[in-house]
Image (cartoon, grey):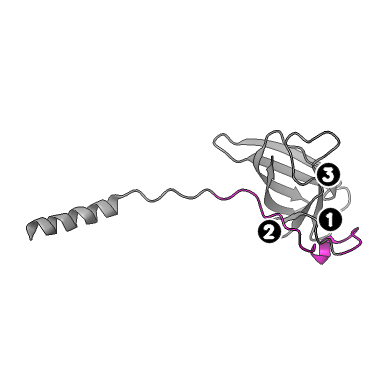
Amino acid sequence: MKLRSLLVVVLLVAGCSAAPPPAKAAPCGSSIVTDALPEWARTGFSDDGAGVPHVFGRGGDILAVLFGNPLKATPDQGRANKILWVSRLPAKMGDTLRITATLDGATPETVDRKVDGGPGPSIVDLPKPGCWRLTLKWQDRTDTMDLTYS
């Protein structure tokens, strides 16, 4: 009986002092969807935009229409990483969309890009393949999204 009690105590202590399981890394990439664009993002489209790859900002304040899908760190000749940024709320003309992109990984790398004139058409090239976490700032708004460059 004493041996059984000792075994129970040892197992309880071992269970309490065991390291917690490692945290799972967050998956890269906000979801790329091809369903109909929201009504607020359809200006310039002849239909509802279904079939056009796009990514919503986490806060829902901006949408990236990926005309250059898949995005590539080294685009093929004659191809570009064209992204149309659409703000949910009207943007002031002449503003700048500021993009801070951080490469996910053991040694994060951060680069800054800007789109003069605010949300609108752009070419956004990033220096390396991987998961890039974008912080997007325009006017008094901020939103974020992940984009994968191959």
Residue at image location 82% in from the left, 39% down from the top: 80
Q: Which one is nearer the viewer's eye here, 44 or 70?
A: 70
**Residue type marked 3:** Ser
Label 3 belongs to which residue? 122
Point out which mark residue 91 bears: 1
Q: Element type at marker 3?
A: strand
Residue 136 on the magenta segment:
no
Q: Residue furthest left?
A: 1
Coordinates of residue 90 in the picture (x, y in percent):
84, 59
Label 3 with label 1: CB-CB less than 8 Å:
no
Label 2 belongs to which residue? 59
The residue mark sitting in front, 3 or 1, is: 3
Residue at image location 77% in from the left, 47% down from the top: 69
Coordinates of residue 114 in the picture (x, y in percent):
79, 41
Residue at image location 83% in from the left, 39% down from the top: 79
Q: Which corner quadrant of the image does residue 55 belong to?
A: bottom right
Within-10-Å neighbours for mark 2: few <14, some 14–19, many 20+: few
Which numbered disc, 3 or 1, marks the residue that appears first in the sequence? 1
Q: Element type at marker 1?
A: loop
**Residue type marked 1:** Ala
| Count of labels in the image | 3
User: Which stretch appears magenta?
Assistant: 26-47
Question: Overall secondary structure of the magenta stretch?
Answer: loop
10 on left or right of 125: left
Alpha-carbon span between mark 2 and mark 3: 21 Å
Q: Element type at marker 2?
A: loop
